[in-house]
Image (tube, helix red, strand yellow):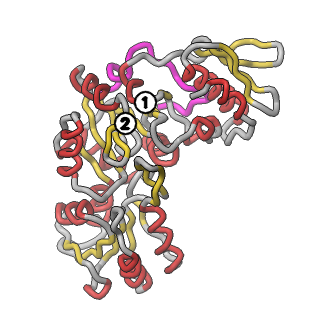
Amino acid sequence: MSHPTRPEASESPLHKTYDTALLDLDGVVYAGGYPIPHAVASLREAREDGMHLAYVTNNALRTPQAVAEHLTELGVPAGASDVITSAQAVARLIAEQLQPGARVLVIGGEGLRWALRERGMEPVDSADDEPAAVVQGYGGPSFTWDRLAEASYAVARGVPWFASNTDLTIPGPRGLAPGNGAAVEAVRLATGAEPQVAGKPQPPMHRETILRTGAERPLVVGDRLDTDIEGAHTGGVDSLLVLTGVTSPAQLLAAELHHRPTYVAADLRGLLVPQPCVEETARAAGAGFRCGGWTASADGESLLVEGAGDPYDGLRALCAAAWTVAGGGACALDADKALGQLDL
């Protein structure tokens, strides 16, 4: 696993290089329940060529069986054992700290309840049910304010608090909506407490994924720098960022070290092709970087790009220029003009 100052190359297609794709769902495979363009066909081809596909989601709302059925309906055959959710990761984390049969106040959906029962715990609905823990996960669009109140009552009494994940947003067909992290923040503000978090990018989620998939050469595939890509860094594995979800090209260029993916692609078709090399080139004004038909550099205030061809090659070259200038931090150079030339 690397911490790149430029996107890496792969002479063979990624689905031949890695044995297992650990795929995020929202923003990678689908958005708002509808498939993202090219996702279904790309996953079918990768699977038919022998790559194991595992679907790793921070969304704790649905059970693995429900997620698998949805994927199958979209045209991507999957079984419940192919799906790993943050509900499973947080249930394991809670079970390791409580006695068997313990009551757990659930602030979320059926996915959390199912995962707790799988670990031998009893879900309850009220802070007055004497829970031994509180667990909070995404509750869907019909989630009500009184559920946050129940969580706050119990946490304020000193009951241990767990969160499936802290994603602030969740992508949908109309844009970004508040995610579980927004609801967690409400309880945090009400109580002053801090939850134990299981989901990406925290280690419990990576542990759950490896335990359930047995992956030996995994590749994390995601759309978020602060969960998918950071989680890959935390787990010490390579990653592919697809630009079909929440991360914009500008955010990618400004990524700090632990948010930089190994590979970059427009969408899941990137799994099926080799990844191009980004080469350093000598320039009169300093170092530049070339990828495909594009060359990128920095002039001290702005990022520059020139050339023609696949615009994502231009983005890869810009990543190298930005990340090299920034070192381990975030690149603050103006990228608007350069990105405008790529017209991504």
Seen at 70% across and 38% down, the residue is 331
Q: Which mark is residue 166?
A: none
In the image, residue 88 above or below residue 270: below
Residue 273, how many percent across, how many down?
40, 17
Q: Is residue 297 left or right of residue 49?
A: right
In the image, residue 173 above or below residue 135: above
Task: Out of 344 and 67, give the one closest to the viewer.
Answer: 344
Instruction: State the SS at label 2.
Output: loop
Seen at 46% across and 62% down, the residue is 181
Query: From the image, which quarter does the C terminus lie in?
Result: top right
Marked residue nearer the N-terminal end (1 or 2)? 2
Q: Residues within 10 Å of mark 1 (few under 14, many from 20)?
A: many
Residue 194, how many percent across, how many down?
48, 71
The answer to which quarter of the image holds residue 328 is: top right
Identify the residue position indicated by label 2 in the image. Answer: 36
Seen at 50% across and 73% down, the residue is 188
- Residue type at mark 1: give it: Asp
Identify the residue position indicated by label 1 in the image. Answer: 267
The rendered magenta stretch, by its main secondary structure, is classed as: loop
Residue 37, how many percent across, how many down?
37, 32
- Residue type at mark 2: give it: Ile
Which callout, 1 or 2, points to the residue nearer the camera? 2
Distance from Cα at disc 1 to Cα at disc 2? 9 Å
In the image, residue 205 above or below residue 229: below
Q: Is residue 187 left or right of residue 51?
A: right
Q: Which residues are magenta?
A: 1-19
The answer to which quarter of the image holds residue 18 is: top left
Residue 330: within the magenta?
no
Instruction: State the SS at label 1.
Output: loop
